[in-house]
Amino acid sequence: MKLVTYRASVEAAARLGVLHQELVVDVARLGADHGETLPDSMLGLIDTGRPGLETLQACLDQSKGRFRPGTATALANVKLLAPIPRPRKNIFGIGLNYVEHVAESAASLDTSKDLPKQPVVFSKPPTTVIGPDDAIEHDSSITRQLDWEVELAVIIGTTARRIRRDQALAHVFGYSVMIDVSARDNRRAGQWIFSKGMDSYAPFGPVIVTADEIPDPQCLDLWLTVNGVEKQRSNTRHMLFKVDHLIADISSGITLEPGDIIASGTPEGVGAGRTPQEWLHPGDVVVGHVEGIGTLRNPVVNSTPEA
């Protein structure tokens, strides 16, 4: 299933939907139409675990593509939000997780040229999250080196604590797309959280695809363009630390909980690694894509305070 968080109008509250062809089907209303209680938020559905997804699928199957008025809305007529508009915890970011990106970072960002022996983990606060077509804020009083990174996002479905790699993927709820925006000139004594953790620096969406539709997360093409020009293209098979390794590693010391998000790293082609270096500016449009999930588009806007 492809799950979304959406608004049916500017004034409407955020709702949980499931995509059916070109329709957004309201999950809670669909459940009510079939005498079932289903949640109206993504985190609520994640918390129900496998039974919630099974009930939702059964309701969809029973509907056979026919929905009551008010239960389904044309996709073109809704505003998609970040699938989890406000994560419960910081996003777990993974740095230097593609071999070629390690090399380009060493050349341009003073990181080690040696491949990491363990995953490099940082975090992005919940306030970084924005949804499809929302604006990436460019504050030139803070940064002149705003950069892009397309990533596969992994959403945890069940609590994972000290688990083995062979158990890891069973704890995944689904997958999405994330653009890890970075202010390269705001790294502080090797610390990345301010550089990567500013408001609007985690475009996320447009959907969460449930894990049953992506049995192998290590075979997905991903790419990113700026103003229609391709900057990144790779495949998740080139990850240095695979998704199961990331989950096992983080859970060895930090309990992963339902709704937690892991941004699994980016391939080569970031602005800092290009010759000459390239940066995002107001008016630019960034588009990221992961195969089997979808395309995420975000404009860059000026947010510099007036003097």
Image: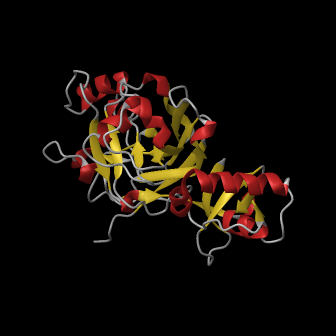
The correct choice, above or below, for 114 with respect to 63 in the image is above
Front one among 248 and 273:
248
Residue 26, image quadrant: bottom right
Tell me residue 132's x, y (percent).
56, 55
Tell me residue 252's x, y (percent).
27, 39
Residue at position x 78%, y 69% in the image: 33
The correct choice, above or below, for 66 with respect to 241 in the image is below
In this rendering, the count of numbered labels is 0
The correct choice, above or below, for 150 with respect to 21 in the image is above
Q: Is residue 294 visible?
A: yes
The correct choice, above or below, for 221 with respect to 196 in the image is above
The image's colour scheme reads: secondary structure
Tell me residue 6's x, y (percent).
62, 64
Which residue is situated farthest in the bottom direction here? 11
Which residue is situated farthest in the left direction here? 189
Q: Quadrant of the C terminus?
A: bottom left
Residue at position x 72%, y 59% in the image: 24
Residue at position x 31%, y 49% in the image: 255
55 displayed left or right of 197: right
Residue 179, image quadrant: top left
Q: Is residue 136 visible?
A: no
259 displayed left or right of 240: right
Residue at position x 37%, y 62% in the image: 127
Residue 200, image quadrant: bottom left
Tell me residue 71's x, y (percent).
77, 67
